[in-house]
Amino acid sequence: MLMKNFVIKCLGLAYILSLTSCSSGGDAETTVAGGGRGGVEYGFVSLSVTDAPIDNAIEVWLQFDGVEFMPSADSPHQDPVLIMFDTPMSIDLLELQGNKSKALLTDEILRTGIYDWVKLKITAVKDGVMDSYIVLKDGTVHELDMPGGSDIGLTINGDLEIIANMPSAKTIDFDLRKSIVMNNPNDFQIQPVIKLVSNDKSGSIEGTVKLKTLTSSSCSDSDPSTGNAVYLYEGNKVIPDDIGGSGAEPVTSALVKLNNLTGNYEYSFGFVPFGKYTIAFTCESDLDDQSTDDNLNFSKTKNININNTRPVILSPNTFH
């Protein structure tokens, strides 16, 4: 159940809904989703979250309390639309890699028009309460602290258009490798690097890497389960570089992990906006410190063009 500051949703037909007096107090506005005589037009939005991974953690939990939408400056309705969850949603972002996602809102009703930003209400405060926290590979658990906490929230800029009677599906993509900052061994902040992606205008990339590539003499160690990642860069023919520093900045990255069912070492990118990209593999991702300019070894690169929602499947010979 959700609480919204301008309307409470009642049951109705999938795309022709009448919003009648179903609120707990006061007079409710009577409208039809497609407009009508004196009616207000509405559309539908679904919002999910997904994640790009982080090397040294096995769990990253965030507590989501609600979502806020801000109409554009040209909209006749300037009041932000705040949707608070009756029960906070605790989500382990590390469970949402590749094409996996978790729904925050499903077919939620919004007025038609353009919205300039979406804000996630998140509780991440270092106060002794494990609302948002990280679990490291050594088993230690640390609270995540976000500057400003839930009073500020996480704002994602970018146009969101709601069309009368039409659904709009968006995914919020967290890049945890860039978002988690360790100030000292017991102090972790979340400074999110996130983007809003249209599901119908994004594709995916899937591939495998040979075992000998993961354990070559140029790797940071001989363990195929550590330090191996594929970096994704915007544009073709990009010269790959680490996260941070002065070179090309990767859009996101994907860890190479063993699939126990297939026996293959696999990676995947989900919710990649249509466009041209370059991918490159490194077996030294565990040496990549976003606060410094690191000299990582990369494999040869491959150009990829994404112009539809079908996955791009890459062979294990892509990197050697």
Image (tube, rainbow, N blue to C red):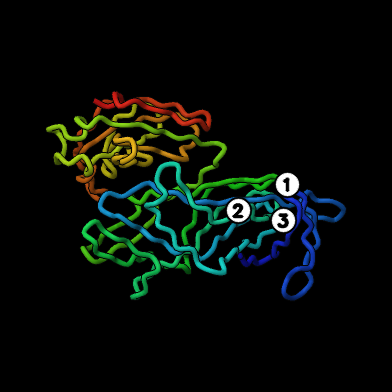
Quarter of the image for the C terminus: give it: top left
Residue 47 image offset from top left, x and y in percent:
55, 51
Position of 313 relative to 88 (above/below): above
Q: Amino acid at mark 2?
A: Thr
What residue would you read off at disc 1?
A: 165
Quarter of the rendering occupied by the N terminus: bottom right
Amino acid carrying label 1: it is Asn
| In this rendering, position of residue 181 left or right of residue 198 | left
Can I make out residue 308 in this image? yes
Label 1 residue SS = loop
Q: Residue at x 42, y 49 (%)?
A: 96
Q: Which mark is nearer the camera, 1 or 2?
A: 2
Residue 7, given in percent of the width and then of the height, sits at 70, 64
* Residue furthest front in the image: 261
Asked if the residue at tag 2 contacts the one at tag 1, i.e. Cβ–Cβ closer than 8 Å, the answer is: no
Q: Dot 3 corresponds to which residue? A: 76
214 on left or right of 79: left
Relative depth, front residue between 61 and 113: 61
